[in-house]
Image (tube, rainbow, N blue to C red):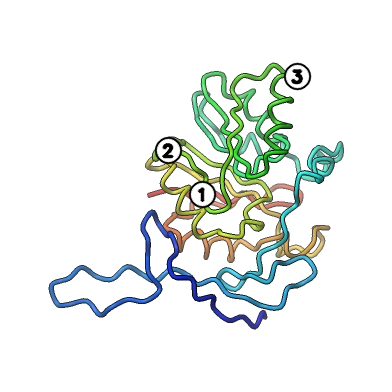
Amino acid sequence: MLKCRPLLSSVLLVGGAIALFFWTRPTANSAPPVAPPPAYGSCPPSADGIGKTFMGREISHVMGHPGIGWLERTTREKEEAPTKAIALLELAPDAVIADIGAGSGYYSFRIARLLPKGEVVAVDIQPEMLAFLEKESARLGVRNVRPHLGAVDDVKLPPASLDAALMVDAYHEFDHPAEMLASLRSALKSKGRIYLLEFRAEDENVPIKPHHKMTEVQARKEFEAAGFRFVVNKPDLPWQHLLVFEKP
């Protein structure tokens, strides 16, 4: 168990509203107070963590653009079954989906083939990744993958512009997860879904570093605190959960 102390951030963006860490007692006629946001904390950094925690979980280091080779490895289909994972999304042909932390576009380009009338917004915070995506789009002749520069605390997409969002082995690296989930909730349409693919931390046989895994319990705790409704876990992939959440 991590021994952490809360960080005294002044505000956090949660559920599309700014919630202060300190509240005054409401008067008899005032509205009920907004639930306090989950505090970030700190702990001694582990070998693969950044020393910042969220709801008891230490956030992992980011795999940067030098990791493109890992993302594009030839063994990925056998190890992760991305073709099966994409089929489980069951997207409409005109869907607009954001691939958050799109990286090299491994998922973006494969999903785009299934959306003849839709679009994949490939969101990343690294310009190098977006440059790679643009070159790949031109090389492959793909017109419905749109590279988009986000920020560490905001996807920077218009309100109610997305039918769905996908995060593939990326969420555990977000160093502002509460703010990111709030911005995603704003960007999703009503009943819009988040598809969260994370390596199963419950399974010690999954050969991935511990900080790059998540349990279903931890993921549900964080997403439900951000106002999302848990729909289902589709666990029949070799190494990952496919957790589905919905914006009410």
Type of the residue with mark 3: Arg
Which numbered disc flags the more N-terminal residue, 1 or 3? 3
Which numbered disc flags the more N-terminal residue, 3 or 2? 3
Could you classify mark 1 by the number of other residues whose Cα lies within 10 Å: few (under 14), some (14-19), or many (20 or more)? some
Q: Secondary structure at mark 2?
A: loop
- What x and y, as percent, mark residue 117? 52, 19
- What x and y, as percent, mark residue 122? 61, 35
Q: Secondary structure at mark 1?
A: loop
How far is the residue under mark 1 from the one under mark 3?
Answer: 29 Å
Relative to 50, does residue 89 appear above or below in the rendering?
above
The residue singled out by tag 1 in the image is 154
Task: Looking at the picture, tell me which residue is in the foreground, 241 or 58.
Answer: 58
The residue singled out by tag 2 in the image is 158
- What x and y, as percent, mark residue 198? 67, 53
Could you classify mark 2 by the number of other residues whose Cα lies within 10 Å: few (under 14), some (14-19), or many (20 or more)? few
Relative to 224, does residue 239 appear above or below in the rendering?
above
Q: In the rendered view, does 125 fall on the left or right side of 39?
A: right
Q: Residue at x 71, y 38 (%)?
A: 129
Q: Which residue reaches farthest left?
A: 29
Q: Which mark is residue 139?
A: 3
Relative to 89, does residue 9 appear above or below in the rendering?
below
